[in-house]
Image: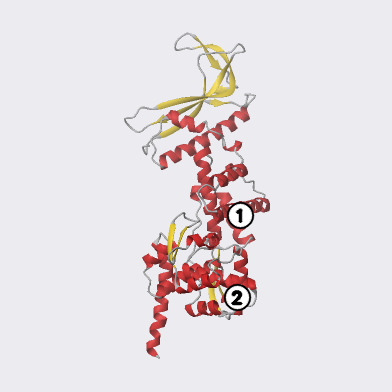
């Protein structure tokens, strides 16, 4: 649409037919005044409201005409004397807000739209008739077709967080309440009441915006969410060094759960597999010393060459890796690292809103499933593997993701170079 297009909305009394009790229907006239050279378009939407009319002489024509009584309607406005005055005012305000939201988006995306198409969008289901929770449930069910189970679980976790926020702040989860004030209240609750980190808040907002964008395309609810901004911050990459990995790999664990967690974790360290893909791995995925598997998260087919270390783990488990729940691996691998002596104080940062705390924790406390994938990438770079090859193996598509690890490799090179001084 042109930058000079203009939208006008006003009440009018319908012409022509007058009822037996001397009333005429109120209508809303939409006028789309186009930029120079394009014809102005109009469309009418009839309401359920009526005004009293009476016959009066028109001084210009000398003829009698039906006109609204002044206590009901005058100069395009309903007056307080109308029995439905408050209802009409509310209806018109809601209508204008919806129409202008749609018109604003049309202009933003530079769509070419006729006034009849605009009318059609406005007449679609009103937000107040759409349940926020039911719509979110529908969104989750639709997303199951092409999203990984872990992603679906994340969606549900975010909705549970929003419900907790709603109860704590006494703010109803409804489409007409999702505005910038809602965003600021959610941010305050997240950081000050729950103490969640900046990157987790960014994920919550990411899911919320994805849902609202999806629902907006179907129901044309409020779109204030377009202004929500919650950028992630770059955090330290926690990984095992080669020596630490070898210590863990060779350690003789006596507790069965620790041994299983070590086998699974180290296999991820040697292959770069995500824990979700590891759980799906079967002997059928292993062909000619490489893994061929469809990544759950992205749907990409991955070809992962197997190192001698990965092959050895398969051999000592008779070709079939043991199974363990993700949460259980997370718990046990911390214990494994602690027992194996991976206890060095490690510096890391906590980001909660604008507050940054520098922390020092025993390294084993910072180890989790995803540390294995970071370990694979970091050690592969340090051993000279091409970043493009690593990206192909792990399924990364953005150079910016790999750049975080390249910074670590540069630091590693500086440390290695110091050996010349000794």
Scheme of image coloration: secondary structure
Vertical position of residue 48 compared to residue 377: above or below: above
Query: Residue at the location (44% across, 33% down)?
Result: 7
Q: Position of residue 281 (x, y in %)?
A: 52, 61
Q: Which residue is mark 1?
A: 157
Provide the residue designation for mark 2. Answer: 336
Q: Which residue is situated farthest in the front direction here?
A: 318
Q: Is residue 170 left or right of residue 310?
A: right
Circle 2 Cα neighbour tier, 10 Å, few/some/many (<14 / 14–19 / ≥20)? many
Number of marks in the image?
Answer: 2
Element at badge 2? helix
**Does residue 236 show up?**
no
The residue under the point 57% across, 16% down is 53
Q: Say which element carries label 1.
A: helix
Q: Is residue 275 above or below residue 8?
A: below
Looking at the figure, which quarter contains the C terminus? bottom left
Residue closer to the observer: 105 or 398: 398
Using the image as rendered, state which of residue 77 and residue 45 is in the foreground.
45
Q: CA distance from mark 1 to mark 2?
A: 29 Å
Measured along the vertical axis of the image, is residue 243 above or below residue 96? below
């Amino acid at each position: 649409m042109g930058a000079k297009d203009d939208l006008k909305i006003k009440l009018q009394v319908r012409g022509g037919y007058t009822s037996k009790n001397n009333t005429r229907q109120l209508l809303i006239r939409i006028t789309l005044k186009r930029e120079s050279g394009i014809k102005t378009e109009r469309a009418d939407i009839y309401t359920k409201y009526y005004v009293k009319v009476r016959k009066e002489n028109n001084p210009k024509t000398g003829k009698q005409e039906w006109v609204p009584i002044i206590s009901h309607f005058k100069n395009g406005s309903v007056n307080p004397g109308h029995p439905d005055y408050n209802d009409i005012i509310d209806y018109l305000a809601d209508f204008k807000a919806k129409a202008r939201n749609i018109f604003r988006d049309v202009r933003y995306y530079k769509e070419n739209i006729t006034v009849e198409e605009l009318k059609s969008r406005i007449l679609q289901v009103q937000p107040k008739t759409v349940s926020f929770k039911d719509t979110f449930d529908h969104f989750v069910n639709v997303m199951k077709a092409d999203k990984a189970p872990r992603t679906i679980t994340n969606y549900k976790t975010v909705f549970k967080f929003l419900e907790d926020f709603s109860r704590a702040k006494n703010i109803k989860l409804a489409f007409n309440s999702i505005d910038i004030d809602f965003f600021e209240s959610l941010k305050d609750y997240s950081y000050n009441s729950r103490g969640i980190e900046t990157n987790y808040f960014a994920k919550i907002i990411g899911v919320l915006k994805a849902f609202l964008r999806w629902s907006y395309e179907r129901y044309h609810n409020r779109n204030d969410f377009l202004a929500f901004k919650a950028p992630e911050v770059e955090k330290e990459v926690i990984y095992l060094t080669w020596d630490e990995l070898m210590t863990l790999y060779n350690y003789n664990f006596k507790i069965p759960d620790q041994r299983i967690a070590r086998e699974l974790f180290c296999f991820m360290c040697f292959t770069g597999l995500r824990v979700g893909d590891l759980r799906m791995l079967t002997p059928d995925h292993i062909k000619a010393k490489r893994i061929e598997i469809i990544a759950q998260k992205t749907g990409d087919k991955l070809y992962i060459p197997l190192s001698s270390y990965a092959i050895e783990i398969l051999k000592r488990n008779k070709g079939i890796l043991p199974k363990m729940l993700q949460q259980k691996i997370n718990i046990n691998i911390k214990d494994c690292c602690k027992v194996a002596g991976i206890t060095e104080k490690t510096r890391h940062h906590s980001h909660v809103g604008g507050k940054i705390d520098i922390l020092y924790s025993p390294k084993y406390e910072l180890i989790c499933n995803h540390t294995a994938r970071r370990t694979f990438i970091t050690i592969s770079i340090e051993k000279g593997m091409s970043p493009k090859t690593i990206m192909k193996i792990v399924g990364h598509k953005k150079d910016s993701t790999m750049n975080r690890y390249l910074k670590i490799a540069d630091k590693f090179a500086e440390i290695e170079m110091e050996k010349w001084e000794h």
